[in-house]
Image (cartoon, grey):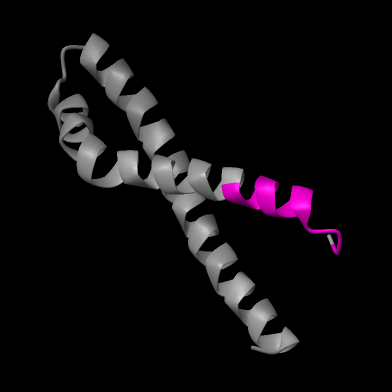
Amino acid sequence: MNWTEKIEWKVQIDKFLIGNLFIIIFGFFFFIISIIADSLSYTRPLSLFQILWKPLFLPCLSIFFTAVLVESIINKFNPES
């Protein structure tokens, strides 16, 4: 694997993680709106958020924080960065 292939691989992973971050941000705003709607006795958005929590938002959070942890470990031991 040469240098340009390594850069392309990292670019693809970064694009995936950026998309993942947008899902997390969307989930945060959806959660806030759901809480507000639930306080106004409209429970459907909160029910939808609870349904989507395990299959969508929890894996996105796990991937995001794992990537942050792995990248910080790699950068700590990689003198090139």
Instruction: Depth check: give the residue in front, 41 or 15.
Output: 15
Image vertical order of residue 42 relative to residue 65, above or below: above
Q: Tell me how many marks there are.
A: 0
Direction from residue 21 to residue 5 in the image, left or right: right
- Per the rendered image, the range of residues in magenta is 70-80
Q: Position of residue 24 (x, y in %)?
A: 43, 42
Classify the position of the N terminus by image quarter: bottom right
Which residue occupies 59% across, 43% down? 69
Instruction: Depth check: give the residue in front, 80 or 8.
Output: 80
Q: Where is residue 18 in the image (x, y as percent from the top left)?
A: 54, 57
Q: Where is residue 65 in the image (x, y as percent from the top left)?
A: 51, 41
Q: Does the magenta stretch include residue 2?
A: no
Which residue occupies 21% across, 45% down? 55
Residue 13 occupies quadrant: bottom right
Which residue occupies 16% across, 19% down? 42
Image vertical order of residue 40 relative to residue 48, above or below: above
Direction from residue 41 to residue 2 in the image, left or right: right
Q: Position of residue 62 (x, y in %)?
A: 41, 42
Residue 61 occupies quadrant: top left
